[in-house]
Image (cartoon, rainbow, N blue to C red):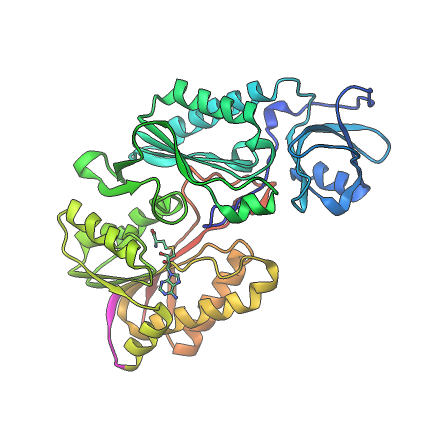
Amino acid sequence: MPARDGSLVSGPINPCTMGTMARRDSDSGLKVTISPRGAARLKEQHPWVYRSDVVDADHIRPGSLVRVLGPRGRFLGTALYSTSSQIAIRMISLEEVSDLPGLVAQRIRDAIAYRTEFVSGTDAYRLVFSEADFLPGLIVDRYNDVLSVQILTQAMDNKSIREAVLGTLTAELNPAGIVERVDPRIRELEALPPRSSSLIYGNKSSTTIAMNGTGSAGVRFQYDGLEGQKTGAFLDQRENYAAAARHARGEALDVFCYQGGFALHLAPRCSTVTGVDSSRPALEMAEKNAALNHREMQWIEANAFDLLKDYAVSGKQYDTIVLDPPAFAKTRRDLEKAVRGYKELNLRALKMLRPGGILITCSCSFHVSPQDFLETVASAARDTHRTLRVLQSRLQAKDHPVVLSVPETAYLKCLILSVSN
Ligand code: SAH
């Protein structure tokens, strides 16, 4: 799942590699046989098959390239196999694959070409987004001249694949440094040996980036590849920052501000901007980013739930409020609790917005659907007797592509609302 915690671990199918394949199994290569339910899922163009739908996978080593066979022995395509994840199979092609490193290199070049065509006005963006770029288990972010790589599956951790990734990135982009960001929880889930985050190429792990404009015309941020949450910045919000700035006004409050992404974009439009986050290191970086952009802002280290409660009780008022909390629902089971969390935050923010104010409210929980989210915000509006009109209903930036047949690739929701009364 491609959530804010970088856990999008899915795997779309490249339409270019789709062909009609009614080939029968031959004896070459490792084979995995799947159930009718698993085969039906692949037919829907979803790249995952769960372990419960694997019928036969004898003696397959972690991270192997496997030929996937349907219930009657029909060849369905080639996949990456995990011996430990609940997602046992991630499709990589509907055809036979004999040179996986070569295929990975080509897919990386394709992902770069996609960004060249569709992403502009920034030197920081996601270059490879796992299943959304037909490279399940690989995430690469570009921060100006530094790249950040995350490996999320057994297959992508194989030596030959790591070499292909590194070789292609250096040949295509000539970065000053490449850092590998390790999520220990994911390595544990994939039964991979522990590893620490480190510089794996070149000599540079920190740099300065500019987004929504180039150089000093953009909003600038410091990036340290070996610090911070996720792979550094929340690049998925880049286009939403610019959209929010177009509507922002007056006194603004950025709740869950992290290193100041929204706050710094709102600053040129607002009389004052205050950022709130519970992480001191994030706020220290936010303050450095404010200085880099020659802005004066206020940062408050607090639990947002407590602070909003106090503010609402004491009658504090704002003209613009941003809510961008972490994913409340990491699994479907958390849905109800997550909805309660979103409701409470939106309720408190609505109590504090002046008439004519702007609410920018986000959810990065894949398990909370756009409809669930809209209904939650609507119910907060009803309870506070406010009328909201939707100015924009947005999702993640284009460098985090949404693949229509893979719902997990669409996770971020961002509503920009005007408060009428
Ligand atoms: N808006 C940010 C991203 C926010 S990510 C951006 O665009 O860059 C979520 C943030 O919420 C993290 O910085 C995390 O430190 C913070 N956070 C998590 N729980 C919190 C809480 N209870 N109160 C305040 N901040 C919290």
Which residue occupies 39% across, 31% down? 118
Q: How many labels does the image show?
A: 0
Which residue occupies 43% across, 26% down? 112
Give the side of residue 48 with respect to residue 172, left or right.
Answer: right
Q: Is the magenta stretch mostly helix, strand or loop?
A: loop
**Does residue 29 show up magenta in the picture?**
no
Is 358 rendered above or below residue 6? below
Q: Position of residue 11 (x, y in %)?
A: 59, 37
- Pick out the residue farthest to the bottom: 313
Q: Where is residue 150 in the image (x, y as percent from the top left)?
A: 47, 37
Quadrant hosting residue 310? bottom left
Which residue occupies 53% across, 44% down? 8
Is 401 rendered above or below residue 273? above
Q: Position of residue 237 (x, y in %)?
A: 37, 47
Which residue occupies 52% across, 20% down? 106
Give the side of residue 388 with respect to residue 129, left or right.
Answer: left
Q: Where is residue 381 in the image (x, y as percent from the top left)?
A: 41, 72
Quadrant hosting residue 180? top left
Q: What residue range appears in magenta?
A: 314-319
Ligand 1 positioned in quadrant: bottom left
